[in-house]
Image (tube, rainbow, N blue to C red):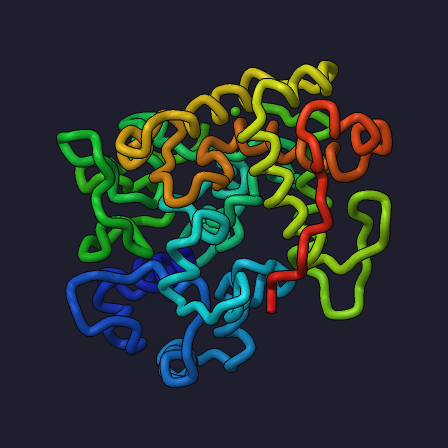
Amino acid sequence: MAGYHLRLAHRIGISPLDFAHRCGLTAGTTFPTHHLVRLDDKQSRQTATVCRLALPEVHALTLATQAPSYPPLHPVYPGRHQSQIDMANDGWVFTAFSRYCPACLADTAGLPGGAVWQGSWRLPLTFLCTRHHRILDWRCPNCQAPAFSNGYRADGRWRPTQLTPSPRSRLHPAHAAMAPACAQQLDHPSAPTEAMVHAQQRLSAAARSVAGQKVESLGRPTSPQRFLNDVRAATLAICSTWPATAEVLTSTEHLDAVAAHAEALSRAPAERSGAQGDGWLARSVDHPPGDPLRAAALMALVVRFLTTRAVRQSSPACCPGFPPAVPDIAG
C-alpha cells in the first residue's frame, strides 16, 4: 500500500498526502498507518476508482490479504474484536518503519514510478530476502534513521509514524526519505544462515497459507494459525527465561543477537518507551526485535524450538511447563 501510493504519487507529480486525499484515505494532514492493515468497503471502492484497479487488486495491497493466516491480522484476536488501529499498534503486526532489500529496490528502480517497496517488509516476521539471500536492512546508510519512518525527535523519541515518510513532500521511491532533509539512495550488504532461511520460509508459508492447510508444530500437525500462535508463545518463553535457553541450545548461531534483544526487553518500561538501539518503539513485552538481524536470529531459534524433538524433550529443565499447548486465539 505505502509503496504503491509513493510510486504512483511520484509518477503523477503530487505528494502522497494529496494522493491519499483523492483516494479517501484521509481528510487531514496525516496519512494513518492502519490503512496498510486493511481498508473498509468505502475506502476500497474509492481507491479502486481513482487508481483504476479491481477491488481484489486494492485489497492485495494490504497486509490482511498478503498474510491471510497471520492471527494478529484477524478482526478477532486474542478472543476480542480489534479495530484496524488496534492491529496497527500491535507489536506483532506492524513495524514503525520499513525493512528493505537494497537489491530488490535496485531491480525495480527502472519501473514506471520507481522502486517497489514491498508491504510484507513491514511485518515483524519478515526479516530476510530469500530471493537475494540476504538479511534485510532497516537504517538509512546516510542519516541512520529507520527507513520509511519520520525519524527521531531531538530528545531521541520517535516522531509520530505515518504510512509514508514526510507525506507532504514529493519523494522519489528509491530514496530513503526518513527525515525531510535526507534523500539517500538505498542501494548498498549480510548473508543469512541456513537456519534463518528455513525460519523465514516456515513463517512466510504459514502466514500466506489458505484454510485447510496443515503445518507441524511441537511434533504434531496443526493449523498455520496455531503454529504462529506457538511462535509468539515461544518468543515470550525464550526472552523471559533468558539466558537459560542459551544454555540448552548452545550450538545456535548468533546467540549474541538474541541476548541483546532479551536484555533490551529487561529494561524498565520507561527505557523501553523511547527509541531503542534496534529501532523499535516497544508496545508489548513479547514483541520481535526491530533490527532484522536480531529478528532473524530469534526467529531461527524459535522455529528450532518448535521443530526439534531434542529441544522439546529437554525444555522443561530450562523453563518448566514449556512449551504448553497454545490455544487458537485467532478467532
> Measured from the top left, where is residue 242 in percent x and y?
57, 23
- Which quadrant of the figure has residue 316? top right
The answer to whether residue 168 is above or below residue 186 is below
Residue pictured at 28% horizontal, 42% vertical: 177
Spot the residue most to the front: 320
Taking the image as shown, residue 198 lies to the left or right of residue 266, namely right
User: Looking at this view, is 311 or 116 the one in front?
Assistant: 311
Work out whether residue 113 can be spotted.
no
Taking the image as shown, residue 147 lies to the left or right of residue 309, namely left
User: Looking at this view, is 320 or 15 the one in front?
Assistant: 320
The answer to whether residue 57 is above or below residue 255 is below
Taking the image as shown, residue 79 lies to the left or right of residue 143, namely right
- Point out the image quarter for the N terminus: bottom left
> Measured from the top left, where is residue 59 in percent x and y?
51, 73
Taking the image as shown, residue 34 lies to the left or right of residue 155, namely right
Residue pictured at 85% horizontal, 27% vertical: 310
Work out whether residue 32 can be spotted.
yes
